[in-house]
Image: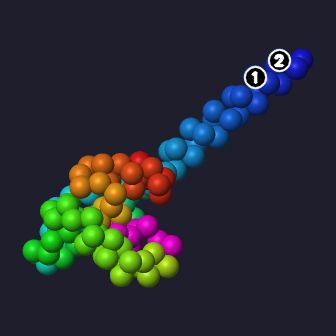
Amino acid sequence: MIQSKILVNSLCMIIFYANSISKMEKMVVKRSTNPSKKYMAIFTKDNKKVKTTHFGQSGATDYLLSKNKERRQRYRQRHQKDLRTKDPKRAGYLSYYLLWGDSTSLRTNIANYKKKFNFK
């Protein structure tokens, strides 16, 4: 009897986890179609577009290009206010974590961002 309850609880946890994963939003980052921006993030849920956010000034230097840690630190201090929105789909969040993130690799920063904010 105890083993069957444990099995049922385990199955319920697996089903709950599978359902929560399927309800996660997906994020894809591409080159922007807006000539004044570098990238765009497309957020989808259940294969339906939720939001597209263009971010990063085209032609401007960022941490991915400059690799200058002091410049990155100054940018992040100056733009800390952008995180007050608590909305990771906003351009301020995307620039802060992707263009001025911990790594000089966009791919690494995207992976960290998805993990931090629970995107697929």
Image location (x, y in percent) of residue 7: 75, 22
Left or right of 49? Residue 5 is right
Q: Amino acid at mark 1?
A: Leu
Residue 117 sits above or below residue 53 on the image = above
* Magenta-tinted stretch: 86-96
Q: Residue furthest front?
A: 70
Q: Which residue is mark 1?
A: 7
Q: Nearer the viewer, residue 26 or 36?
A: 36
Q: Secondary structure at mark 1?
A: helix
Q: Which residue is mark 2?
A: 3
Mark 2 and mark 1 residues within 8 Å of each other at the beta carbon = yes
Q: Secondary structure at mark 2?
A: helix
How many marks the image carries: the answer is 2
Q: Nearer the viewer, residue 64 or 49?
A: 64
Image location (x, y in percent) of residue 92: 35, 75
Residue at image x 82%, y 19%? 4
Image location (x, y in percent) of residue 8: 76, 27
Quadrant in which residue 65 is drawn: bottom left
Q: Amino acid at mark 2?
A: Gln
Residue at image x 21%, y 65%? 68
Left or right of 85? Residue 92 is left
Q: Can see residue 24? A: yes
Q: Can see residue 51? A: no
The Cα–Cα distance between marks 2 and 1, rounded to whole angstroms, is 6 Å
How packed is label 2: few (under 14 Cα within 10 Å), some, or many (20 or more)? few
Left or right of 15? Residue 64 is left
